[in-house]
Image (cartoon, rainbow, N blue to C red):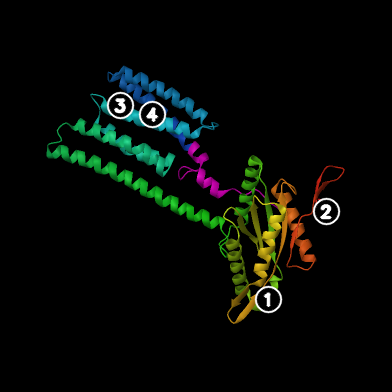
Amino acid sequence: MNTPKHPDLGAALEHSRSGLRDNHRRTLARLLFFVTGAALVVFAVLQFFNGFPWVSAIELLASGLLFFGAQRLKTTPHLQQWIYAYLVAIFSFFIVIMLLPDASIAAFVWVLMMPVLAYLLLGKCEGMILSVPFMVVGLVVYYFFLETVGTAHGMIDLLNMVLCGVLMQVFMHMYEERREEAEQRLVDMAQTDALTGLANRANFQSTLARTIAECERNGSGFALVVMDIDHFKLVNDTLGHDAGDHVLRNIGQCLTERLRTTDSVGRLGGEEFGLILRDVKPADAFELMDELRERIAGRELHYGEAGIRVTASFGIAQWPDHGQDAETLFCVADRCLYTGKRAGRNRVAPAGPVHRDRSEKTVAGGTV
């Protein structure tokens, strides 16, 4: 069985902190660094002629750091730290600009940019945690900037700013919440077999790759089982494909009912299923699969007025005894499966004992 590398969508989603993947966040962050750096050069010149040379010097220094950071962002593994440093620095700079004695009222519009940048680059939770405190400080500064809040005109200005800030925060949060839900649904659809509700082949292979990596770290083992329904084509040919689908759904339910929460099961395609049994010895894996074989063989499925009985054959390979990579394990389990089918079906066929030939290649139940 070929085991091409599939992107682990679940892991990608988990590690994605916002609606953008890391490569897109990296590109956007570099663009923001360049644009902000260039803008600060312009503002530094204006602040110098406006009588604030110290502000101008700070802006020029920040501009140099941003241009340096834009180059580092191409390859740095610390993308998240750079994004946090940028957002905290730029939000603090917005506050400082608002506190200047001759601050322009237009400077306060930057408060409304805080949730946009934070949610876009950090996602829902971290974006909210970072943006809300800065927005509150910005609105407080604006309150004191107005001075004459007691008048109707001042109150209108304050309410406009507060309402716009609150609505911007709420809209960004709601948008990010809905986006996460929609993305999760899409990922679930991409990783789930629509008929049985089990993991599909790509998802199962990703789980297998993660299991191998975890077992290499902690020294534990697992068994890979490939299961195939015997004479499944006969069900489709005699009762129709709807009956076959009914059988597949029931087999999937039977597998999930019997396995432990630490185990994994997926539909590899057609009538073939894959199982990953964590922390089991070969004898225990055989006993568990033989019990599952008996459970499937003893179950009568009802489809209309017809009663359907099916059996299944199992091939078992043990990690790391029979292979240390996914492709080798699948090959061994597949060979055991078809050995069992040739021997009469409805049986569990574990891989044989491992020994070494003269070329030191691992051999399990035959020549690899």
Residue marked by disc 1? 237
Quadrant location, the N terminus? bottom right
Looking at the rendered structure, the kind of residue marked 3 is: Val
Asked whether the residues under the numbered discs 3 and 2 touch, taking CB atoms below 8 Å apart as contact, a structural biologist would say no
Looking at the rendered structure, the kind of residue marked 1 is: Asp
Q: Residues within 10 Å of mark 4 (few under 14, many from 20)?
A: few
Gap in angstroms between the C-alphas marked 4 and 3 = 10 Å
Judge depth for marks 2 and 4 and give the one in front. 2
Q: Residues within 10 Å of mark 1 (few under 14, many from 20)?
A: few
Looking at the rendered structure, the kind of residue marked 4 is: Ala
- Whether the magenta-drawn stretch holds residue 182 is answered as no
Q: Is residue 270 above or below residue 134?
A: below
| Image location of residue 276, percent across then percent down | 64, 54
**Disc number placed over residue 89 in the picture, else none:** 4
- Residue 35 visible within the image: no
| Nearest the eye: 77 or 315 | 315
| Nearest the eye: 176 or 351 | 351
Could you tell which of marks 2 and 4 lies nearer the N-terminus?
4
**Disc number placed over residue 96 in the picture, else none:** 3
Looking at the rendered structure, the kind of residue marked 2 is: Gly
Could you tell which of marks 1 and 4 lies nearer the N-terminus?
4
Could you tell which of marks 4 and 3 lies nearer the N-terminus?
4
Could you tell which of marks 1 and 3 lies nearer the N-terminus?
3
Q: Tell me which corner region of the image, top left, top right, bottom left or bottom right, holds residue 243.
A: bottom right
- Whether the magenta-drawn stretch holds residue 6 is answered as yes
Which residues, given as a range, are shown in magenta? 1-26
Asked whether the residues under the numbered discs 4 and 3 touch, taking CB atoms below 8 Å apart as contact, a structural biologist would say no
Asked whether the residues under the numbered discs 2 and 4 touch, taking CB atoms below 8 Å apart as contact, a structural biologist would say no
